[in-house]
Amino acid sequence: MFKRSVFAALLTAVASVLAAGLVPLTKGDGTDPPQPWRVIGLPLQQKPFTRFSIVDVGGERVLRLDADHSYGNLVHPLTDGTASRFLSWRWRVDVPNDRANLRLSSGDDAAVEICVLFDMSMDAVPFVDRQIVRAARVQNPILLPTATVCYVWDAHFPVGTELDNAFTRRVRMIVLRGRDTPLRTWSQERRDIRADFLRLFGDEANEVPPIIGISVAADADNTQTRTLSFVADLALEP
């Protein structure tokens, strides 16, 4: 089973009612993220779920991610993400994961990551991965993401490191913040998601496919640790 794989972990999210635009994480006044944001785990997950909640930090409402020996994705499906070029947000880590090593399945945990889910043409997906997607679609005909770009806060690798997920090349990552970034301090990001997709998946595609979802995640199940992080002002831009 692929951990943090878009084939399995995000199946239920993509099967939900699709949203036309990215709903702000702090819309409303409750402590739960607003619909259509949904917490998604692995199929038949027995391990604890990462806790996602809206809290007050410094007088503003933000998303809190508490990963305690746990796994989980907060996913927002989309229908009109094709025209979006930039993704912006602020994030911070208060408790990092010093045991993580994204190159190893035993260390494949992140204190926080922001992911963009793409519907890449099946013709461009390598043979083995293509068969996995097709098998999943037999169980559920709703379209599954076939490529994912993740922006990671990692305490092990230097900023700028690009690497494949330890379980599947359908997920490719960029380390944006990490060991030299101050803790408990907000950092601002703005990424050209089209350029990042073409750089990371350029061996398989020469054009940017539609965006079908955004995911915010944190996990600490492989390293059996606990992390704490926050995300604010997540938005797609033309």
Image (cartoon, grey):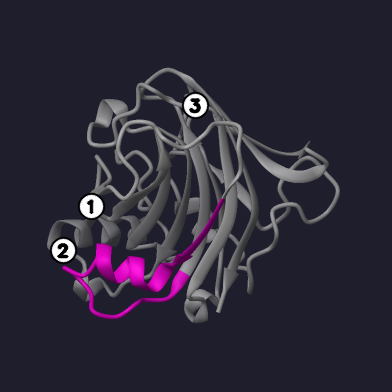
The question of residue 44 being in magenta is answered with: no
Tell me which corner region of the image, top left, top right, bottom left or bottom right, holds residue 1. top left
Q: Depth check: 35 or 89 in front?
A: 89
Was residue 199 drawn as part of the magenta stretch in this picture? yes
- Over which residues does the magenta segment extend? 188-211
Crowding at mark 1 (Cα within 10 Å: few <14, some 14-19, many 20+) = some
**Are circles 3 and 1 on residues that touch, CB within 8 Å?**
no
Comparing 28 with 56, the one in front is 56
What amino acid is labelled 3 in the image? Ser
Work out whether mark 3 precedes mark 2 in sequence or the reverse, and give the earlier one: 3
* Helix, strand or loop for disc 3: loop
135 to the left or right of 33: left
Q: Which disc, if any, is residue 126? A: 2
Q: Residue 209 appears in which quarter of the rendering?
A: bottom left
- Say which mark, if any, is on residue 169: 1
Q: Position of residue 134 (x, y in %)?
A: 27, 62
Q: Name the residue under label 3.
A: 70
Q: Which residue is pictured at 30% across the width and 53% down the height?
A: 172
Q: Which amino acid does label 1 sit on?
A: Arg
Task: Measure how far apart labels 3 and 1 are at the Cα level.
Answer: 23 Å
Q: Earlier in the sequence, mark 2 or mark 1?
A: 2
